[in-house]
Amino acid sequence: MVGEYRDPSDDVDDFRLDLTRPPASVEGELDYESTVTAPTEWVPYVYTDTELRAHAERHGLSVAALVFGLLGLLVAIFGVWGAALSLAAIVLAIMARATEHRSGALWVYGLVTGLAGLLIAAGWVLVITLVLMSAVS
């Protein structure tokens, strides 16, 4: 009984109870034997540590938005040509916001510098338009 010494080589187990029974067959269902190896539930994909690190360290769009925003701001100070770079920075920052959740504030800086560059470029367009209109009249 409890605490009693049992010989490990003995195959007979007096204390074993068989609590399982084969399920009763129901008309229209598969046999129990045919479903033993079938999957019974959805198993989610488990990411490896390498995949998690690669996903967490993904900041490409945010860095590109910041670089394009800074270049667009710098070029927009000297002329209207920075508008294209600033517009690219805004688009990249919006894409980074949706896809790179752990990139911190990089996409925000790219968005702000892109908007500032676009605003300065729009100011250049306004100044050029006013100068041309005053020269014509």
Image: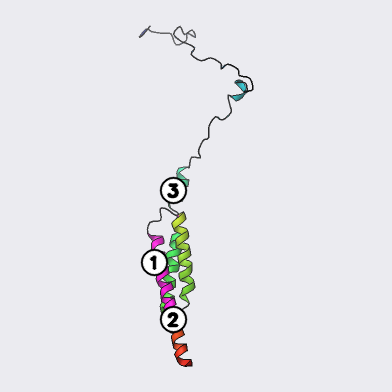
Query: Who comes first in sequence, dot 2 or dot 3?
Result: 3
x and y percent of residue 24 in the render?
Answer: 58, 16
The residue at which mark 2 appears reads as 126
Q: Is 73 or 22 nearer to us in this picture?
A: 22
CA gap between label 1 and label 3 equals: 28 Å
x and y percent of residue 87 in the render?
Answer: 47, 69
Single out the residue that lies furthest toward the front: 137
Q: Is residue 105 magenta?
A: yes
Kindly state the secondary structure of the residue where label 1 is placed: helix
The residue at which mark 1 appears reads as 112
Amino acid type of the residue that numbered disc 3 sits on in the rendered structure: Arg
Residue 122 picture quarter: bottom left
Residue at 41% across, 74% down: 119
Q: Nearer the viewer, mark 2 or mark 3?
A: 2
Kindly state the secondary structure of the residue where label 2 is placed: helix
Q: Which residues are magenta?
A: 100-124
Q: Is 129 or 120 nearer to us in this picture?
A: 129
Q: Are marks 1 and 3 in contact (CB under 8 Å)?
A: no
Amino acid type of the residue that numbered disc 2 sits on in the rendered structure: Leu
Principal SS element in the magenta part?
helix
The residue at which mark 3 appears reads as 53
CA gap between label 1 and label 2 equals: 21 Å
Residue at 43% across, 50% down: 56
The quadrant of the picture occupied by the N terminus is top left
Amino acid type of the residue that numbered disc 1 sits on in the rendered structure: Val
